[in-house]
Image: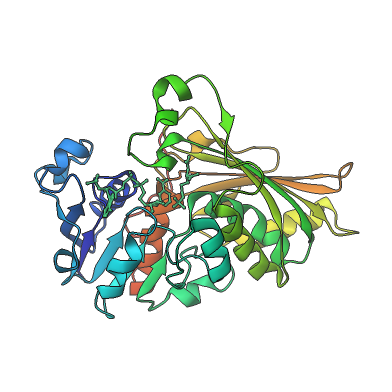
Amino acid sequence: MTISVAVSGASGYAGGEVLRLLAGHPNVEIGAITAHSNAGSRLGELQPHLHALADRVLVDTTVENLTGHDVVFLALPHGASAEIAAQLPDDTLVIDAGADHRLTDPAAWEKFYGSPHAGSWPYGLPELPGHRELLRGAKRIAVPGCYPTSSLLALTPGFAAGLLEPDDVVIVAASGTSGAGKAAKPHLLGSEVMGGMSPYGVGGGHRHTPEIEQGLSAAAGEQVSISFTPTLAPMARGILTTATAKVRPGVDAAALRNAWERAYGEESFVRVLPEGQWPATKMVVGSNYAALQLAFDPHAGRVIVSAVIDNLTKGTAGGAIQSMNIALGLPEGAGLTQQGVAP
Ligand SMILES: NC(=O)C1=CN([C@@H]2O[C@H](COP(=O)(O)OP(=O)(O)OC[C@H]3O[C@@H](n4cnc5c(N)ncnc54)[C@H](OP(=O)(O)O)[C@@H]3O)[C@@H](O)[C@H]2O)C=CC1
Ligand SMILES: CC(=O)N[C@@H](CCC(=O)OP(=O)(O)O)C(=O)O
């Protein structure tokens, strides 16, 4: 089975990672690759690591150029994908790496994104309870944000098993700079980022807060509220998320470990590390893997979970392709790797 795939935003980080993985996918033929200000350029000028595609030319991101493919990936800035997606044929599988179709609550969307809500699509995080069933045969998929991917993978097993209090959850995550996209921004200059770390979006203002709460609340079956603080780390790729939550009375270390190991025991792309080994972002660079570890702190009555992903792979393009594979009935791991790049 060969499927034709168009990739928009192909000059950016997310689109580039989608192309890197699709180039190794056994069932994919890469069709149109599109951009905005860089339309007309050779891909090799903008994504010099994509050797096999170097001579392909980027075309404009238009409905006409994207139509006629089995699958269309949208890797565009927030707000740019909804209008295009609405004009693509219903039988095309459209996979949106942006946020436009992630939130189910219009009020939360309007509060955090300040524009009208475009609606919600099946959420492309297959390891969440019931999500594979939602993705099978889907024609529209919303790819999770990178912080929500790591945060939801970190805490969902505890909420799904009813072990955690819903109103005392603290998540602090560090991301590499590629999470902010390729467009030049003063706070991402090497001289600002190298050799130090800093928080941003502090005080509940980051737009991933409602997305994480949405996923955890669905797992818990009740409203979960979180405090989320992202930080910028001096590395190109990777997210280290450390999430802590108060455990319910009587919950002990064995019950916690059992819940996480049961949740991920059969998963190909999520691993609870052997007890005592803690995740590091270097374990997952370039891989579609999430590695995590947990500990019970009896003094604080809290579980502490650390999770690492590559923000561009499991956190965007890898998760998107994993979801595509499920939607199309292909082997879930096609085109994806569990192995990282080290040292
Ligand atoms: N980076 C990450 O880790 C993650 C990113 N995402 C999401 O993926 C999407 C793309 O992000 P990322 O690749 O990082 O961003 P980049 O800034 O690296 O790339 C943006 C892409 O969108 C194109 N573009 C810019 N403006 C427009 C427009 N008005 N209409 C159409 N195309 C436009 C750019 O084209 P050109 O260069 O030609 O101007 C470029 O190809 C975003 O929605 C982001 O939230 C999701 C999860 C993680
Ligand atoms: C380091 C950094 O700036 N990260 C981005 C998140 C990137 C991402 O995954 O999120 P979206 O797909 O929702 O944009 C941020 O905090 O805005």
| Closer-to-camera residue (187/160) | 187
- The answer to whether 36 is drawn above or below residue 248 in the figure is above
- Which residue is at 46% across, 69% downward? 117
The image shows a total of numbered marks equal to 0
- Which residue is at 21% across, 41% downward? 50
- Location of the C terminus (image quadrant): top left
Place of residue 111 in the rendered image (x, y in percent of width and height, measured from the top left): 56, 60
Place of residue 66 in the rendered image (x, y in percent of width and height, measured from the top left): 19, 65
> Can I make out residue 87 in this image?
yes
| Closer-to-camera residue (264/172) | 172
- Which residue is at 86% across, 43% downward? 300
Place of residue 283 in the rendered image (x, y in percent of width and height, measured from the top left): 50, 37
- The answer to whether 45 is drawn above or below residue 8 in the figure is above
- Location of the N terminus (image quadrant): bottom left
Would residue 126 appear left or right of 65 to someone viewing this image? Answer: right
| Closer-to-camera residue (54/142) | 142
Place of residue 211 in the rendered image (x, y in percent of width and height, measured from the top left): 56, 60
| Closer-to-camera residue (290/271) | 290
- Which residue is at 53% across, 54% downward? 149
> Can I make out residue 127 in this image?
no
- The answer to whether 120 is drawn above or below residue 51 in the figure is below
Colour setting? rainbow
Residue 25 lies in what quarter of the image? bottom left
Residue 265 lies in what quarter of the image? bottom right
